[in-house]
Amino acid sequence: MACLLLLGACLMWAAPLKAAPKADLWPFWSEHDPSSERSLDHAEWNDFLERYVVSGPKGVNLVRYQEVSTADKKRLQAYLDRLQEVPVRSLSRDQQFPYWVNLYNALTVHLILEHYPVESIKDIDISPGLFSAGPWDKKLVTIEGKQLSLNDIEHRILRPIWEEPRIHYAVNCASMGCPNLRRQAYTAQNTEAMLQAGAEEYINHPRGVQIDDGQLIVSSIYTWFTEDFGGSDASVIEHLQQYAHDELKSRLADFRNIDDDRYDWSLNEAD
């Protein structure tokens, strides 16, 4: 009994630690070629997004997982196979960023389709290790001879290399609480506009920011990854104000601290 209680306590402590990995650079992936003129084609992923991602009634983009055809599942797999053949380190930074974001999002959708039906991505418990949960630590692809997981892509490549807080509005975890999965693939040409739009949409939506009974309630993203938004409540609020519309920006001026955070892990599935 004592052992079981100790195990339960360890699991309880492990969960929040696993929820927010630190940005930890994998040096192998920091290489790039600024002179490279190679441009990657993400047309298959773009077509998938246009066909199966819809805008829900509450401003949350939803995915029609149950309607994805066998042919489109094969096309998605072919797209992922093609991305794994790309010599990523020989690309320019402008091409690398959409490569990693599109890979992350396409892998996440592919995971859901492989295990569908599920109520939450957290139910796909395939990560190795006794205290691991969910799919994020499972090695899913091999690129330039290296096996990578979703956590590798987000926390060991995207976050430490670009040091861009808006990355959190680009990568999608297939959940209702997450920033929208865009209906368009990222490219070198549209990245800045997509990041800007993603930040504005999320921050001005209740799942990003709520002010309720004089309390400031934010998405848990801002507490899990406070370091990416300046390291304090005050810096997070400053970030929110940068993208908030006029009324919300004015109301945020009254706050110096965050009172609570929330996150909805239910699947971003269209009915």
Image: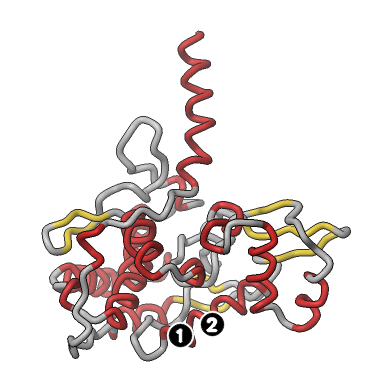
The percent position of residue 195, horizontal first and vertical second, equals: 49, 79
- Residue 125, relative to residue 144: is it above or below? above
Q: Which residue is mark 2?
A: 196
Q: Is 51 on the left-hand or right-hand side of 270? A: left
The percent position of residue 43, horizontal first and vertical second, equals: 29, 85
Residue type at mark 2 is Gln
Q: Is 5 on the left-hand or right-hand side of 188? A: right
Pick whichever, 108 or 57, lies toward us. Answer: 108
Q: CA distance from mark 2 to mark 1?
A: 6 Å
Residue type at mark 1 is Glu
Pick whichever, 3 or 37, lies toward us. Answer: 37
Q: Residues within 10 Å of mark 1 (few under 14, many from 20)?
A: few
Look at the numbered disc 1 and give the secondary structure of its residue. helix
Badges 2 and 1: C-beta atoms under 8 Å apart?
Answer: yes
Q: Which residue is mark 1?
A: 192
Q: Residue at x 24, y 81 (%)?
A: 92
The percent position of residue 34, horizontal first and vertical second, equals: 22, 83
